[in-house]
Image: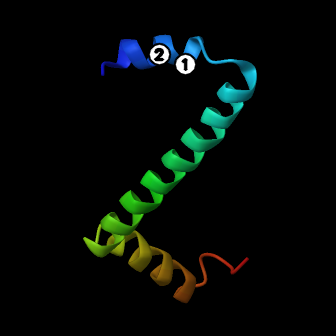
């Protein structure tokens, strides 16, 4: 199935089915983002930013929330 076919199918959904699809798709995208963040975290992609934040806090350049 192509993106164009999916777009066409979505435009033909009745309102209740469109709402159901929208809720499902929003949850799907959220789950995909969660998986990407977890993978990036495990790969150490946030390590430098976390260290800078810790260093700034220890140096008194920021305050906890």
Name the element at disc 1. Answer: helix
Of residue 37 and residue 13, the one placed in the foreground of this image is 13
Could you tell whether 60 is left or right of 42 in the image?
Answer: right
In the picture as drawn, the residue positioned furthest to the left comes out as 43
In this view, 44 is above or below 7: below
Q: Quadrant of the N terminus?
A: top left
Of residue 33 and residue 13, the one placed in the foreground of this image is 13
Q: Residue at x 53, y 89 (%)?
A: 58
Q: Residue at x 59, y 43 (%)?
A: 24
Name the residue that disc number 2 marks. Answer: 7
Q: Residue at x 50, y 45 (%)?
A: 29
Of residue 23 and residue 15, the one placed in the foreground of this image is 15
In this view, 54 is above or below 10: below
Could you tell whether 56 is left or right of 51 in the image?
Answer: right
Q: Estimate the x, y position of residue 32 in percent, counting from the top left.
A: 43, 52
- Residue 20: image quadrant is top right
User: Mark 1 Cα within 10 Å, few/some/many (few <14, many 20+)?
Assistant: some
Of residue 58 and residue 34, the one placed in the foreground of this image is 34
User: Mark 2 Cα within 10 Å, few/some/many (few <14, many 20+)?
Assistant: few
Q: Estimate the x, y position of residue 55 in percent, counting from the top left.
A: 46, 82
Name the residue that disc number 1 marks. Answer: 10
């Amino acid at each position: 199935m192509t993106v164009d076919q999916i777009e066409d199918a979505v435009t033909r959904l009745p309102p209740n089915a469109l709402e159901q699809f929208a809720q499902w798709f929003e949850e799907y995208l959220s789950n995909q983002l969660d998986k990407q963040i977890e993978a990036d975290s495990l790969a150490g992609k946030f390590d430098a930013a976390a260290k800078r934040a810790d260093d700034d806090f220890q140096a008194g350049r920021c305050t906890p929330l």
